[in-house]
């Protein structure tokens, strides 16, 4: 194989492997959640058969409110990094494309500071879930 062919295959393989890893992650996470729901259902059925009092439904530790602060910071800083790298490589006009991830990050941050803190305070006032 010559170097031009290898240079073409590298991004194709990287994209295919990246998408494959994401799909595998999504499928495994979904299967894990289904197993947890099934186990909780079986546990509740056994408790009902034995005549025990059912514990109140609680949210799993893994089923939490998304972390809007983290998402906002990641999107914002990724947009800022893209702006400076595009400005150096392509020019000022092309670097304006990086305003899109910056705007997404700012939207997440605005939501966090307006609504997210209210949700955190409500969750803290209810106490830890049983």
Image: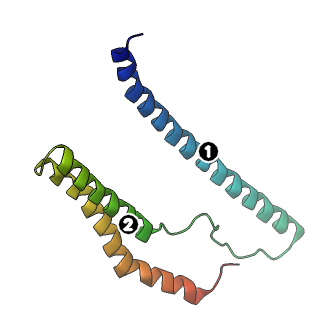
- Please identify the quadrant where the C terminus is shown: bottom right
Residue 32 is left or right of residue 122, and the answer is right
| Quarter of the view holding residue 12 | top left
- Please identify the quadrant where the N terminus is shown: top left
| Quarter of the view holding residue 39 | bottom right
Instruction: Tell me which residue sits at (53%, 39%) in the image.
Output: 21
- SS category of the residue bearing label 1: helix
Counting from the top left corner in percent of width and height, residue 91 is at 13, 47
In whole angstroms, how far apart are the C-alphas of marks 1 and 2? 27 Å
Residue 2 is left or right of residue 94, and the answer is right
Instruction: Tell me which residue sits at (40%, 19%) in the image.
Output: 6
Q: Residue furthest bottom?
A: 125
Counting from the top left corner in percent of width and height, residue 71 is at 41, 63
The numbered mark, 1 or 2, whose residue comes first in the sequence reads 1
Depth check: give the residue in front, 117 or 74.
74
Counting from the top left corner in percent of width and height, residue 17 is at 49, 32
Q: Residue furthest right?
A: 50
Count the marks: how many?
A: 2
Instruction: Tell me which residue sits at (49%, 81%) in the image.
Output: 120
Residue 42 is left or right of residue 65, and the answer is right
Counting from the top left corner in percent of width and height, residue 90 is at 16, 43
| Quarter of the view holding residue 69 | bottom left
Depth check: give the residue in front, 73 or 63.
73
Q: Please say if 64 is above or below 95.
A: below
Q: In the rendered image, which residue does mark 1 sit on?
A: 28
- SS category of the residue bearing label 2: helix
Depth check: give the residue in front, 49 or 111.
111
Q: Few, some or many C-alpha atoms within 10 Å of disc 1 (few <14, some 14-19, many ≥20)?
A: few
- Mark drawn on residue 56: none
Instruction: Tell me which residue sits at (66%, 50%) in the image.
Output: 32
Q: In the rendered image, which residue does mark 2 sit on?
A: 73
């Amino acid at each position: 194989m010559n170097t031009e062919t290898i240079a073409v295959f590298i991004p194709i393989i990287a994209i295919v492997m990246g998408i494959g890893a994401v799909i595998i992650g999504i499928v495994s996470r979904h299967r894990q959640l289904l197993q947890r729901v099934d186990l909780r259902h079986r546990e509740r059925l056994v408790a009902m058969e034995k005549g025990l009092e059912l514990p109140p439904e609680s949210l799993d530790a893994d089923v939490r409110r998304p972390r809007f602060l983290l998402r906002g910071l990641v999107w914002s800083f990724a947009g800022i990094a893209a702006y400076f790298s595009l400005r150096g490589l392509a020019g000022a006009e092309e670097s304006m494309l990086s305003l899109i991830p910056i705007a997404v990050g700012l939207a997440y941050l605005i939501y966090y500071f307006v609504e997210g803190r209210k949700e955190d305070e409500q969750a803290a006032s209810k106490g830890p879930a049983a």
